Amino acid sequence: MIKFIPISFLFISITLTYLSKNLLTIKISKIIGLLIIVISLVFIVLGILTLTTNRTTIIPGNKPKKLVKDGIFRFIRNPIYLGDLLFIIGLSLFLQTLTGIFISILFFLILDKIVIPTEERILEETFKNEYIEYKRNVKRWGIF
């Protein structure tokens, strides 16, 4: 079940964000939103490319074959989730809606309190001290 939460939540949040567009009136938000969307796609693409290059799963909740610590994963443990979160925020700004901002907060809390801890337990069970050391050296969200 955990593996489908981020994907389905992302789809639902994009839909709700689109349906509630035009609540914000600041036009600069479109430019900032587009910039954030581009940055989010960079995180997502780099994360997926690094995982597939290392021949391990990109499906949340599946048991990984290898602990990936290179590429973008040298700097952040969850680049794809960060990209998803930034995408929702960027889309919200681009569509000028406040709903997406509230959804992004909820999405962050679900990821940070439920999805990621579940995945981290799997990684600790699979890779033991190697993952614990990686966790100690690389922040979950890049900045915290």
Image (cartoon, rainbow, N blue to C red):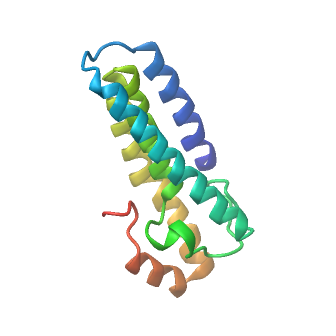
Q: How many marks?
A: 0
State whether residue 15 is above or below residue 115.
above
Residue 139: image location, x then y, percent:
38, 69
Image check: 56 left or right of 61?
A: right
State whether residue 32 is above or below residue 131.
above
State whether residue 60 is above or below residue 107.
below
Residue extending farthest to the right is 55
Residue 50: image location, x then y, percent:
63, 65
Image check: 9 left or right of 101?
A: right
Tell me what residue is drawn at x 33 percent, y 31 percent.
Answer: 101
Viewer-closest of 99 and 91? 91
* Quarter-of-image position of residue 144: bottom left
Viewer-closest of 120 and 17? 17
Residue extending farthest to the left is 26
State whether residue 142 is above or below residue 39.
below
Tell me what residue is drawn at x 28 percent, y 26 percent.
Answer: 28
Residue extending farthest to the bottom is 129
The quarter of the image holding the N terminus is: top right
Viewer-closest of 43 and 116? 43
Tell me what residue is drawn at x 40 percent, y 14 percent.
Answer: 20
Q: Please say whether residue 56 is visible from this viewpoint.
A: no
Viewer-closest of 110 and 37? 37
* Quarter-of-image position of residue 52: bottom right
Q: Please say whether residue 71 is visible from this viewpoint.
A: yes
Residue 121: image location, x then y, percent:
52, 68
Tell me what residue is drawn at x 48 percent, y 29 percent.
Answer: 13
Residue 60: image location, x then y, percent:
62, 54
